[in-house]
């Protein structure tokens, strides 16, 4: 097979097969990821439903128990001693336990009076020591909350306790133990129900068997293993995971909850060498963790069918692509084959046959041999001659050629001979602002001007025009010896060039003319003089022709002028900090006007402008900004020194410096406002239940209250007092929906001095009273 045909076929195959493979892989990856995400979300939803079922029962039992604890019967019983003769009161207390059975099956419930040393359970009554539960009750004293849940393994030992035999008679028999199951979940109430470290008067303990709560857990084959952990990361409710299979996984879940603070989530992990998907959810009621572990193999099983279908489709498309590539490659190669057969008739014995393995190399060599001729070589030499002339002139202008070298090589390049005087014209573009050209066109325009000069001036009066840096330079040769006439002649040539450039290119340019000289070795000095003459544009304006003799230096800058400039600089800096573009433009216009009135020498302008540039740099650094990052590369000092006219400097300062600095200061100020507002909102969220005012925030954040009020109003849209009241009312709504707290208790938790003030604020914000709101929500 021909070499190029093989390359074309391989390239076509790759070009056609690569998109098919990529699309198939991406489609399968996206489908697998979506399936895995759906399964994870489904498992998390099942966990949520399981948690809601369990907590609904626990909350109902909790509310019923609170009513029982706060009933007059219990409150009166906790204030007096009791013995087995108080049969009626004991029976009333145990009846309350029986009422709790309506919510769920209770394994055991007992009321403990620590002060009077008696215990009433569902089936017995006696002293605290009679039941051997003093250690267990003592552990409850370490809890600070008035209501808490405890998961534990209880002893099944039976105690001998006094049991009522009826009508005040007592008999001693083997009493049933209070702990009737090995695995229970205990709901403990302190009496009175006040969260304090002071020893309570007693406890109400309700034990629920793990097996009873386990009935509410979801059993679904797709959800994998599901289990529950208590606050100490211990298993309960079922014994499937007691073998320690998921101990490492549970530690990972606990670290994730503690690190992120998120009560729910899912992630991938590894258990006994198998990849699993883990979903977890933490209960806000008692801190239990509901966990579901599903094998990733079980999740991805559904995506295997997608993989099979995708693979078959991709294979079919690859086969079709291969057939199309073979057919198309042969059709595309047919013109090359015909051209190859044609060029074989032009075969030359100097071309080795071994190189004909690549068709295009062979054709290229044949055509190169065919079109190389004496005319082509002559044109090439002519072009090289022009480049050599320009290279020689560049070395002359930069002082790299001596007079002896010039005399030897000058005749080779057809330079003028027999001159009486020489002079240098340097042309520079003033600005591209307001023209149809862009900055990237500068080099091309300079090249065009250089060609125009070569065509406008006859070769007898000029050396080869060249481009030097950002200027076009021409060395003029004249037979005139009179200085006045020579100056007029060079001015006429410069004006003719400038007029033609403006006419044809519509480009504003200025020309600097050096002093006349006779020795060719003084050319570099004359180039420097013409460049210095062009620098006079800073003070004299653009579109002019300047002679070196016309640029006369003046004395030092006056001290009064320096003081005035510094004062305007301060006003300009203040306007930049305020972000006021109008004032900035006004002060900068005054600054330039003052420089124009004093008619400074062109050499003093860069010094003054660099001083103003340094002041702008200082403003950026005061706000912690990086000058190069904020202003960009074109706002550097080196770029400023390249500007040659006052208009260019003016536009450069306004666009490259002032506008970015104003934008940077505004961004910094807005960022500071947002940070202050966020810190104030954080204080409200942390201290809403305490006395909080704008003055307290000002003391905390070290800002003036008026300033904080203005910033908060700007960022939050409302004032501080309104936001604090609305946040408190949102808390009140939550408590009204989820708790049975009294309205007075909610008012106290929100730091209201009396419920009336709370109700008035609640009605003002929500349009209804707290009581009506609770009824509507329920």
Image (cartoon, rainbow, N blue to C red):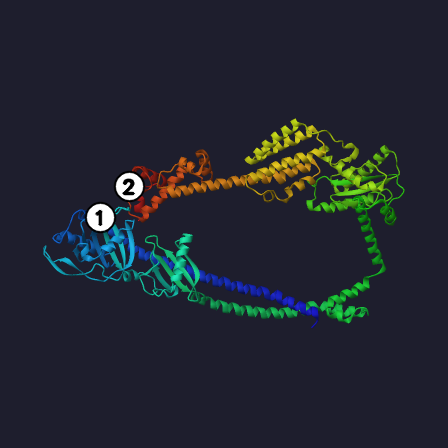
Extreme-bottom residue of the structure:
1
List the residue tagged with mark 2: 744
Judge by depth and name the residue closer to the eye, 381 or 33. 381
| Label 2 packing within 10 angstroms: few (<14), some (14-19), many (20+) | some
Q: Judging from the image, what secondary structure is the residue with disc 2 in?
A: helix
Q: Are marks 2 and 1 in contact (CB under 8 Å)?
A: no
Residue 433: quadrant of the picture? top right
Q: CA distance from mark 2 to mark 1?
A: 25 Å
Extreme-top residue of the structure:
560
Please report the residue visible at 28 percent of the width from the left and 62 percent of the height from the top.
211
Instruction: Answer with left or right where residue 99 lies relative to residue 511.
Output: left
Instruction: Answer with left or right where residue 66 lies relative to residue 302.
Output: left
Extreme-right residue of the structure:
418
Measuring from the top left, give residue 37's x and y in whole percent.
45, 60
Measuring from the top left, give residue 420's x and y in whole percent.
88, 39
| Label 1 packing within 10 angstroms: few (<14), some (14-19), many (20+) | some
Q: Is residue 562 visible?
A: yes
Instruction: Answer with left or right where residue 769 lies relative to residue 549.
Output: left
Residue 201 — which label? 1
Query: How many numbered markers are drawn?
Result: 2
Question: Is 565 above or below relative to 53?
Answer: above
Judge by depth and name the residue closer to the eye, 128 or 341. 128
Instruction: Answer with left or right where residue 767 lies relative to residue 324.
Output: left
Residue 526: quadrant of the picture? top right
Q: Judging from the image, what secondary structure is the residue with disc 1 in?
A: loop
Question: Is 51 above or below relative to 648?
Answer: below
Instruction: Please identify, in this view, whether the residue under mark 2 or under mark 1 is nearer the observer.
Output: 1
Q: Quadrant of the N terminus?
A: bottom right
């Amino acid at each position: 097979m021909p070499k190029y045909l093989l390359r074309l076929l391989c390239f076509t195959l790759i070009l056609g097969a690569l998109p098919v493979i990529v699309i198939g892989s991406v489609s399968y990856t996206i489908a697998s990821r979506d399936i895995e995400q759906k399964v994870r979300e489904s498992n998390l939803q099942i966990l949520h439903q399981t948690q809601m079922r369990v907590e609904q029962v626990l909350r109902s039992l909790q509310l019923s128990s609170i009513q029982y604890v706060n009933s007059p019967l219990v409150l009166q019983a906790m204030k007096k001693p009791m013995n087995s003769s108080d049969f009626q009161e004991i029976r009333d207390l145990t009846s309350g336990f029986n009422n709790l059975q309506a919510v769920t099956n209770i394994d055991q419930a007992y009321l403990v009076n620590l002060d009077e040393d008696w215990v009433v359970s569902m089936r017995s009554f006696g002293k605290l020591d009679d039941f051997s539960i003093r250690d267990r009750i003592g552990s409850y004293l370490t809890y600070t909350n008035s209501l808490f849940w405890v998961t534990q393994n209880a002893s099944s030992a039976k105690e001998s306790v006094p049991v009522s035999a009826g009508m005040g008679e007592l008999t001693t028999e083997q009493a049933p133990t209070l702990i009737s199951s090995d695995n229970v979940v205990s709901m403990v109430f302190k009496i009175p129900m006040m969260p304090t470290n002071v020893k309570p008067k007693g406890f109400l303990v309700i034990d629920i068997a793990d097996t009873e709560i386990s009935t509410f857990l979801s059993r679904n084959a797709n959800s994998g293993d599901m289990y529950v952990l208590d606050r100490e990361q211990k298993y309960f409710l079922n014994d499937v995971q007691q073998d320690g299979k998921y101990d490492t996984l549970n530690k990972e879940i606990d670290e994730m909850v503690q690190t992120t603070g998120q009560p729910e989530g899912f992630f991938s992990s590894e258990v006994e060498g198998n990849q699993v998907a883990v979903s977890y959810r933490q209960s806000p009621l008692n801190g239990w963790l509901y966990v579901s572990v599903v094998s990733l193999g079980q999740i991805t099983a559904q995506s295997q069918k997608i993989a099979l279908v995708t693979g078959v489709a991709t294979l079919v498309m690859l086969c079709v692509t291969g057939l199309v590539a073979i057919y198309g490659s042969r059709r595309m190669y047919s013109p090359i084959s015909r051209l190859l057969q044609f060029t074989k008739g032009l075969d030359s014995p100097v071309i080795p046959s071994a190189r004909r393995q690549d068709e295009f190399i062979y054709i290229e060599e044949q055509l190169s041999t065919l079109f190389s001729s004496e005319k082509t070589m002559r044109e090439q030499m002519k072009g090289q001659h022009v480049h050599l002339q320009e290279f020689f002139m560049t070395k002359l202008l930069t002082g790299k050629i001596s007079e002896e070298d010039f005399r030897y090589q000058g005749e080779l390049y057809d330079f003028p001979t027999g001159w009486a005087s020489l002079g240098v014209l340097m042309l520079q573009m003033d600005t591209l602002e307001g023209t149809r050209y862009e900055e990237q066109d500068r080099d091309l325009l300079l090249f065009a001007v250089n060609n125009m000069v070569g065509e406008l001036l006859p070769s007898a009066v000029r050396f080869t025009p060249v481009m030097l840096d950002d200027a076009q330079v021409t060395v003029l040769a004249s037979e005139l010896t009179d200085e006045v006439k020579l100056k007029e002649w060079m001015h006429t040539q410069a004006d003719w060039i400038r007029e033609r450039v403006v006419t044809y290119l519509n480009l504003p340019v200025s020309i600097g003319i050096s002093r006349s000289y006779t020795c060719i070795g003084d050319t570099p000095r004359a180039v420097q003089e013409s460049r210095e003459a062009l620098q006079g544009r800073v003070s004299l304006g653009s579109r002019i022709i300047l002679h070196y003799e016309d640029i006369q230096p003046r004395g030092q800058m006056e001290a009064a002028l320096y003081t005035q400039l510094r004062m305007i600089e301060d006003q300009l800096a203040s306007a930049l900090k305020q972000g006021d573009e109008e004032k900035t433009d006004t002060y900068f216009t005054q600054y330039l006007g003052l420089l124009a009135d004093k008619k400074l020498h062109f050499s003093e302008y860069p010094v003054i402008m660099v001083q103003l540039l340094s002041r702008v740099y200082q403003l950026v650094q005061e706000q912690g900004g990086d000058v190069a990052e904020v202003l960009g590369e074109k706002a550097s000092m080196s770029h400023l020194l390249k500007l040659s006219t006052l208009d260019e400097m003016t536009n450069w300062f306004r666009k490259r410096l002032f506008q970015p600095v104003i934008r940077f200061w505004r961004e910094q100020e807005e960022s500071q406002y947002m940070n202050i507002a966020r810190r104030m909102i954080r204080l409200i969220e942390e201290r809403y239940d305490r006395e909080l005012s704008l003055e307290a925030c000002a003391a905390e954040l070290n800002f003036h209250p008026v300033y904080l009020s203005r910033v908060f109003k700007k960022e939050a849209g409302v004032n501080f007092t309104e936001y604090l009241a609305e946040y408190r009312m949102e808390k009140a709504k939550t408590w009204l929906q989820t708790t049975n707290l009294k309205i007075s208790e909610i008012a106290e938790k929100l730091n209201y001095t009396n419920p009336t003030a709370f109700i008035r604020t609640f009605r003002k914000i929500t349009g209804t009273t707290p009581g009506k709101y609770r009824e509507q929500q329920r």
